[in-house]
Amino acid sequence: MEEKKYVYLFKEGNGDMRDLLGGKGANLAEMTNIGIPVPMGFTVTTEACNKYYEDDEIICDEVVNQIYNKLEQLENETGKQFGGLENPLLVSVRSGARASMPGMMDTILNLGLNDDTVEVMAKKTSNPRFAYDSYRRFIQMFSDVVMGIDKKLFESIMDEKKNEKSVKLDTELNADDLKELVIKFKELYKKEINEDFPIEPKKQLIQSITAVFRSWNNPRAIVYRRLNDIPSSWGTAVNVQEMVFGNKGNTSGTGVGFTRNPATGENKIFAEYLMNAQGEDVVAGIRTPQPISKLKEDMPKIYEEFISIADTLEKHYKDMQDMEFTIEEGKLYFLQTRNGKRTAQAALKVAVDLVEEGMISKEEAVLKVDPKQLDTLLHPNFDNKEIEKSIPIASGLPASPGAACGKIYFTAETAKQAHEGRGEKVVLVRLETSPEDIEGMVAAEGILTVRGGMTSHAAVVARGMGTCCVAGCGEIRVNEEEKTLIANNVIYKEGDYISLDGSTGNVYEGEIKTVEPAISGYFETLMSWADSIRALKIRTNADTPKDTAQGIRFGAEGIGLCRTEHMFFAADRIMAVREMIVAKNEEERKKALNKILPIQRQDFIEIYEELKEKPATIRFLDPPLHEFLPSDEADIKELAEDLDITVADLKSTIQSLHEFNPMMGHRGCRLAVSYPEIAEMQARAVIEAAIDVKRRKGYDIVPEIMIPLVGEVKELKCIKDVVDKVAKEIIEKSDVKLQYLVGTMIEVPRAALTADRIAEEAEFFSFGTNDLTQMTFGFSRDDAGNFLKHYYDKRVYEFDPFQKLDQDGVGKLVEMAAKLGRESRSNLKVGICGEHGGDPSSVEFFHGVGLNYVSCSPFRVPVARLAAAQAQVKNPRK
Ligand code: PEP
Ligand code: MG
């Protein structure tokens, strides 16, 4: 049997092999093939990573041998030897998953150095300072990444040395200083690990590749995957690449760049670099880099070459590129390129511009914007009037737009606790962020860092998440230990409020009012393309005229779910609702319902007026009745007085309504089975409102009455009969013609299993995937959050099934029920109105199984419109 190939030289791969080589590996292969100056190397595949996990976290001999084999080829082609004393080959080892996960996994540079090769490097380059600087960096990285020794221990040895020499910068240490550091670093290694630092480069290499595989499952990578819908089964590839050095002196340097501005989308190259430095110095934000325009003055030829390659790459990939480059003694190399992460504003502008520049089609443009990112466009900015009155206390780089205010916290952990535990709005303040801070960054409204440029970790990650961020704010002083921020000579402590403007970089004291965002022309253009492409209709979940208007402004084509009970909680009607619940008999209940009727009818009138002729699905009362009852003593007393009954009497009624498991109790259609007069009142309100609006405005309204929580066709029939009786009576007496539909939610597994029977009565279906998920998993939708985290840790489940549809289980029910339903009623309209209606991957699934529409909350309507268009481009419906 032919051996499986686990390792590919860059030149053996190509850009289409993303799944196997990871994004970075596929791009390196592609760049190599199109003649970009890329240092040579090879990629260990994602399949090797999966095999590593299958083999109990050991890289098997077969893979090791293939690695050695490619290493030999690399030696031959570069004319260098790994661990050799003539011309030593040094390599970098980097992770590279199918989807880019910036900074989430590990990297090791300068691998191949040991006490012997470092001497050769020093002599060969006549630059001992460079050789020892590279060596001490390698020891530090290997110890931290591969062996888990805290890097702070190394930093403090370095700081001691700088103090001793009375210097501030690393670059001010000379070769002898660095040599001493190497000795001290190795002593530290031995003390921590009880072994000498490994001098055999092949051992270093296999240990490092192992560490990268292992980092696929580090906690921050797991969190990142969950946030970005990346399954753990993908695994990561590992790229081993010949090192080129940006820290070889003043004709060497390193940088990162975007072919367009990643914050605004402006079509202008945006790059930063540092001379005499390695990549980590730029990304970590320890030194502040120079803009690329400076390179034009210092090394004009290299600048021209850089611009020309950047242009080639953008044209080749037909997208804005994010590139890493190194200049080694006057020669330019590209270390990687990828489609750049960008703000939502930039994503829209770039997508629209690329179409206008003739580079891509509208369909391709629609695929270039992440639907989830649109959220950020729809979120608040500062109120202009307020901001004009406010004087900034400091100013940094406008790293990620939007406005944020909150209480300041100085560690990711405290920020997370404050947000999750106490529901506070928080601003995370750090000297600089690192990937360990991811959970604090997720919890934060805004992020403020003292150090780092526009391409620092904080800036890149915040932009990706759409979180407001001000980076590189050198004017403030932050003491993370003492938890203080000093700006303008004022001390701010943990818990004090500040406000950040991520679009200007300004920092303000206190809380500043925010306003809804204005949507740009690029948004409208791209969304109009999305609308012309998509097959799914998009409705909104809305219970009030205000929400309805908001949903329509965002492009909804109707209401997919109006939860009528939400109208019952208002102060002016809750009393009547309570009267209805505690009523002792039908007569009393009807009396209370008669009080609710006009209010409910008025709600529907206003909603119909807002919708004009757009459809509305109105769901009848769903939650358990006792949810409406008062629980504290004062409220109980007040209600008893109003009802003219004793407190004891009322309490005993409340007690009799108690249920052990209300979510599976007397709710949904079960209420109307017991008390048909509730359905009668609601049917009357819906039909009379429609007739009223039709008569006054001439709108052609076809009310869609939806019965919740049906599990058996006879339940539906029983309520439908009540609705039909009331509706027919009203319509006959009126002078208008009105059609209406009675349908059901599919949210109990039994309904899905018997959907063909149910469709004999139901004129439409709408999947209530919140309850359907709850009842299919048997997980309480209110409590599952408490224990699901253990499931994520153990990778039993990787996603919250209440946010992202469980396609294997719940999805199967949806697909089956839609099919069964249409077998009985071929023109059955089928939609979904659970939370999943606004989740892009779920929308793609609903498109795939042929639903007619999805319905989601107003702010997620644009997300669903775009996701639906993407689904159609990827998997066209005839
Ligand atoms: C559902 O269950 O998915 C649904 C939309 O209804 P609710 O969330 O109101 O139970
Ligand atoms: Mg429900």
Image (spheres, rainbow, N blue to C red):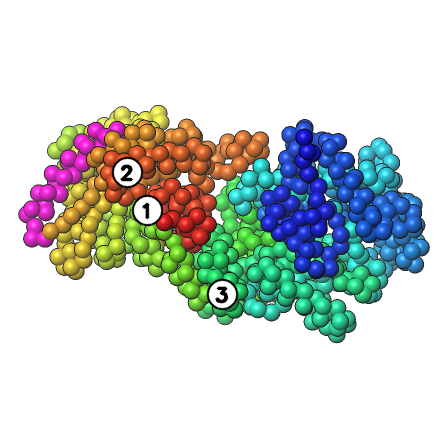
Q: Residue at x 27, y 32 (%)?
A: 756
Report the label total.
Answer: 3
Q: Position of residue 468 (x, y in %)?
A: 55, 57
Query: What's under tag 2, amino acid-wise?
Result: Arg
| Mark 1 Cα shell of 10 Å, populated few (<14), some (14-19), many (≥20) | some
Q: CA distance from mark 1 to mark 2?
A: 12 Å
Please name the residue shown 41% across and 57% down the image: 530
Q: Position of residue 267 (x, y in %)?
A: 57, 69
Q: Position of residue 373 (x, y in %)?
A: 49, 54
Q: Which residues are magenta?
A: 708-736
Q: Tell me: 518 left or right of 3.
A: left
Q: Is residue 525 above or below residue 653?
A: below
Q: Earlier in the sequence, mark 3 or mark 1?
A: 3
Q: Is residue 742 above or below residue 126?
A: above
Is the shortest distance between ligand 1 and the CB of mark 3 under 8 Å?
A: no
In the displayed orientation, state which residue is furthest to the front: 1
Q: Viewed as shown, does residue 551 lie left or right of 460?
A: left
Residue at 64 percent of width and 35 percent of height: 50
Kind of residue at disc 1? Asn
Local crowd at mark 3 within 10 Å, few (<14), some, or many (≥20)? some
Residue hosting label 3? 355
User: 90 or 798: which is nearer to us?
Assistant: 90
Q: Which residue is mark 2?
A: 822
Residue 286 in sight in this render:
no
> Where 597 sits versus 380, above or below?
above
Counting residues from the start of the chain, the first of labels 1 and 2 encountered is 2
Q: Secondary structure at mark 3?
A: helix
Residue shown at the point (60%, 53%) measured from the top left: 461
Which residue matches tag 1?
852
Please identify the quadrant where the N terminus is shown: top right
